[in-house]
Image (spheres, grey):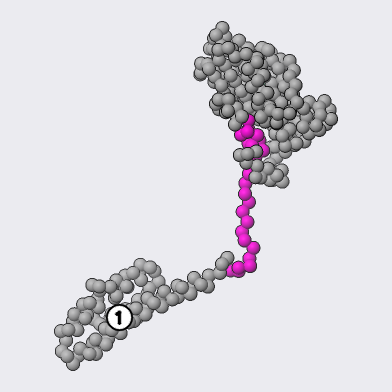
Amino acid sequence: MDLTALEKEVAEVPLDTPEAQAAFRKKFLRKGGVLDELFAQLRQLPPEERKAFGHRLNALRKEAENRLAALAEAHREALNQTPIWGEDATFPHLSYEVGGRHPLSLVEQRIVELFARLGYQLAEGPEIEDDWHNFGALNFEPDHPARDMQDTFFIDPQRGLLLRTHTSTVQVRVMEKTQPPIRILAPGRVYRHETVSARAHVYFHQIEGLCVAVGISAADLKATLEYFLEGFFGEDIPIRWRASYFPFTEMSAEVDIGCRLCGGAGCPVCKYTGWVEVLGCGMVDPAVLSACHIDPERYTGFAFGLGVERLAQLLYNTPDLRLFSQNDLRFLQSFRGYGDTF
Ligand code: DAH
């Protein structure tokens, strides 16, 4: 074994990786390494050579130990000198922008939670719909004004493809596939051909509700919606029922609540009436049940449609509905931290 070559290796071999250091330690300092062999050779040398050779072996071992110790020391020193933060401990810390939920999502989540307690399940349907699900099955007359291009965005008038104008489409889709009992809630985006203003937008959000079973009555409808409005706004919220008309319900009603922006005194949001409409509802028209293959002799049901922007506007006192779609961070950040508890 060439001792001179080994001495050179111990002095010079690069030890800049953990692997190189481990190999070095194994070769020069561990049991079974080259030094064991060299000490075995030592014993066979003539006595006059032994002393000098022994010196060189001890020096070799010492040198190997020193190199590793020097590395460890350098490492310790590097750790001690690493600044606490980047180059400069007085440097301002990084700040992270924490996101928050969109106010419409907060409102939607709250509504879904309230109805989930009554056993309602979520349902959804497509935003691109056909004439049947948006109008036909819901008992709209062929010449109903909503079918007009003035009110509805048609994608392909020939094939009757359009952007749904309400989430009532999901009622149809669910009833076509499911026999009662049915209790669903369907949140979603809807589209209408409107001029964008503080009060109207070309798209907005609705939540549709549908409950169909044996013996469902208007009393169930009223109790359900009052439970919801009181849960949403608080028990002292003024509620007003008005008779109305929808092609797909018979009887039909609309519900207003006392305007929360002006406290009933009158403002642009309530058009100076003190009341704001928040939902439409009614008993599902037997013709709609039939169109969806549900026996109207056996089953009755109620349905309702809530405007999410409207509820959000009243809950958060937001004068202009456009704020909900503009994504102005100053507006959105004011909801930061509103969480699961509203
Ligand atoms: N689809 C109606 C609208 O967009 C809202 C509505 C009214 C939904 C009465 C219903 C209902 O389910 O029963 O204005």
Magenta stretch: give its range. Answer: 87-111
The residue positioned farthest toward the top in the image shown: 297
Q: Quadrant of residue 247?
A: top right
User: Is residue 329 highlighted in magenta?
Assistant: no
Q: Secondary structure at mark 1?
A: helix
Label 1 CB, ligand 1: below 8 Å? no
Give the camera-side residue of 255 and 33.
Answer: 255
Image coordinates of residue 274 in percent, x first then y, are 81, 27
Residue at left offset 77%, top offset 36%:
319
Is 88 inside the magenta-drawn segment?
yes
| Residue 115 percent across, percent down from the top left | 60, 27
Q: Is residue 300 above or below residue 234?
A: above
Q: Amino acid at mark 1?
A: Arg
How many residues crowd around disc 1 within 10 Å: few (fewer than 14), some, or many (20 or more)? some
Residue nearest the observer in this picture, 45 or 226:
226
264 relative to 31 in the view: left or right: right
What residue is rendered at 63% in x and 44% in y?
A: 100
Residue 152 sits in which quadrant?
top right
Image location (x, y in percent) of residue 51: 22, 90
